[in-house]
Image (spheres, rainbow, N blue to C red):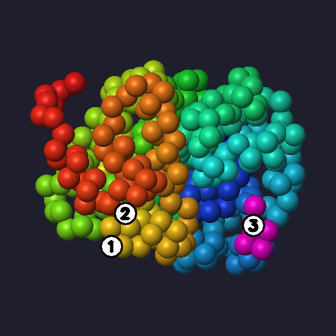
Amino acid sequence: MAALQPKQNSAPITVIGAGSWGTALAIQFARVGRAVKLWGRNSDQLKEMHRTRSNARYLPGIAFPELLQVELDLRSALIDSTEVLVAAPSHAFRELLLQVKPLLLAHVKLAWATKGFELNSGKLPHQVVAEILGSNHSMAVLSGPTFAKEVAAGLPTAMTVASTDASYAIELAHSISGHHFRAYTSTDLIGVEVGGAVKNVLAIGTGMSDGLGFGANTRIALITRGLVEMTRLGMALGAQRETFMGLAGLGDLVLTCTDNQSRNRRFGLAFAAGADSIAAQHEIGQVVEGVAASRAVMTVATQYKVDMPICTQVYRTLHEGLSPAEAVKELMSREIKSEVG
């Protein structure tokens, strides 16, 4: 790995969201020498994290670095903070932004690790940010093939930091990168966000297929054609095609579809085994974003007239009562056409 450049920003960063992903990112920032203030909405959990210097619920066995401070009060977490990272599920993103808005400095830099379209509006996270906070902020999204436990454990990882402000993307990438963590930059904010939104839906579909015992041939077909669907939707929204061949597209898609650390893949496996949606999510014990995301993806695809047959069948299975076996049968009986286009 090439030598890292000196850190461009040593000021503290506030991480909003103390789930597995928010905590893992806070650990990574602190591990490479940046002071971090971490806050979440569950006060009892925060108190336990403050006491034990760990997040035993989501990341057991991982001790917090010295530079990571758990804040029990949101105002204290944000006071004088010039940079904030929001790590929350897409359904809670708008609510959190509205909660922090009165406490933010005028020109705060805002990043997020939220993946998915807003469920009701179909907006991408950067559109929600602009609507609530305006456009006078440097903004960035962190995405790519990462599992929180592996990041927290310090295992070698690469991810993407995307911003229309190229200098901010570089600054943020340097401030989180270390000897076992490398961030690449992109200016394709839309493409990176679309990749993060669609991959969870496809991971559920792949999990269903594997749960039905359809094998490796089916799995790779779903991943490959799923990438085509992701790219189609992204380009319809203004993304760059090459983004989907990178970490935030193909990389995140393959990771989420093939490893059982993926909640969405595990949900698909459980659903195919006969569990209903509520029982499967309860078994996993965390938010399975692909369930609601399937509805949002279909709303946006319909609006932009984008053909997404795999995502359509996942949606119909989850929300219209189509069986997983019948969904695969319908996919395989579609009209023969060119792979390209």
Q: Which residue is mark 1?
A: 273
Q: Helix, strand or loop at disc 3?
A: loop
Question: Is 115 located above or below residue 307 in the figure?
Answer: below
Question: Is 145 located above or below residue 247 in the figure?
Answer: below
Whole-Å distance between the Cαs marked 3 and 1? 33 Å
- Side of 340 relative to 158 (left or right): left
For image coordinates 33% across by 67% down, the residue present is 272
Residue mark closest to the camera, 2 vs 3: 2
For image coordinates 53% across by 45% down, the residue present is 115
* x then y, percent, for residue 48: 74, 77
Mark 3 burial class by Cα count in 10 Å: few <14, some 14-19, many 20+: few
The circle on residue 42 is 3
* x then y, percent, for residue 223: 26, 47
Residue mark closest to the camera, 3 vs 1: 1
* x then y, percent, for residue 109: 70, 34
| Callout 2 touching callout 3 (CB < 8 Å) | no
Which of disc 1 and disc 3 is earlier in sequence? 3
- Side of 7 relative to 79 (left or right): left
- Side of 4 relative to 134 (left or right): left
Q: Helix, strand or loop at disc 2?
A: helix
For image coordinates 61% across by 75% down, the residue present is 57
Mark 1 burial class by Cα count in 10 Å: few <14, some 14-19, many 20+: some
Q: Write down the region rendered in magenta.
A: 41-46
Which of disc 1 and disc 2 is earlier in sequence? 2
Magenta span: chief secondary structure: helix
Q: Helix, strand or loop at disc 1?
A: loop
Which image quadrant: the C terminus?
A: top left
Which of disc 3 and disc 2 is earlier in sequence? 3
Q: Which residue is mark 2?
A: 268
